[in-house]
Amino acid sequence: MIKIATTPASVNEIGEQAMIILSHYYIPNHVNFMQDAAANLWIEHLQGYPVWAIKRAISWWVGKDNPKRSNRPLPGDIAKKCEEEIVHISFVRDRVHLWNLYQGKYPVFLEQD
C-alpha cells in the first residue's frame, strides 16, 4: 500500500497535470521550443512525487482556500504543496520500517507513554 502511494508519477502524468492547471490561465501562443522548455521545468520540479500528490496540490491551488489562486502557479509552488501532501506518507513509511526492523518491539527510546 505504501509503495503504491509513493510511486513517482511518470513524465506523461506530470505533463498532463501541468496542462490541466495551466488551462485555467491565459497562455499566449508560444513557439514550440518555449512550450517544451516550460514542460521540462514542470517535469524537473515534480519528478519524484506521486501523481495523487500532484493532483491534490493542483486541486488546492485552484480551490477557494488558496489566496493566490488567481495567479498562475510556478512549478515550485506545486512542488511545495506536494511536499505537504506526502509528509504523512513518509511518516507512516518510517513507522512501518521501524516496526519491521524491531519486529514489533520498539526500543525503549521509541516507546510512547
Image (spheres, rainbow, N blue to C red):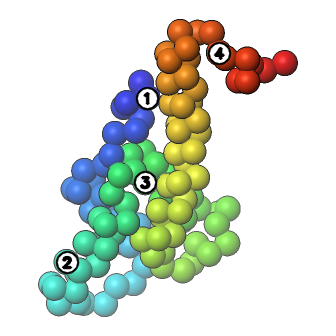
Going from N to C along the chain, the mark reached first, 4 or 1, is 1
**Element marked by disc 4:** loop
Q: Earlier in the sequence, mark 3 or mark 4?
A: 3
**Which numbered marker is on residue 2?**
1
Q: In this view, does 103 lie above or below 64?
A: above
Label disc, if present, on residue 106 of the rendered structure: 4
N-terminal of the pair, mark 4 or mark 2, is 2
Dot 1: what SS? helix
Residue at x-position 17% and y-position 90%? 31
Residue furthest to the left: 32
Mark earlier in primary sequence (2, 1): 1
Instruction: Give residue 46's mark.
Output: none
Task: Tell me the crowding category of disc 2: few under 14, some 14 to 19, or many 20 or more residues within 10 angstroms, Cα based.
Answer: few
The span from disc 4 to disc 1 (Cα, nearest Å) is 21 Å
Amino acid type shown at disc 2? Asp
Residue 24 visible within the image = no
SS assignment at label 2? helix
Label 4 vs label 2: CA separation?
50 Å
The answer for how far apart the CA atoms under marks 2 and 3 are is 20 Å
Which residue is the site of mark 2?
Answer: 36
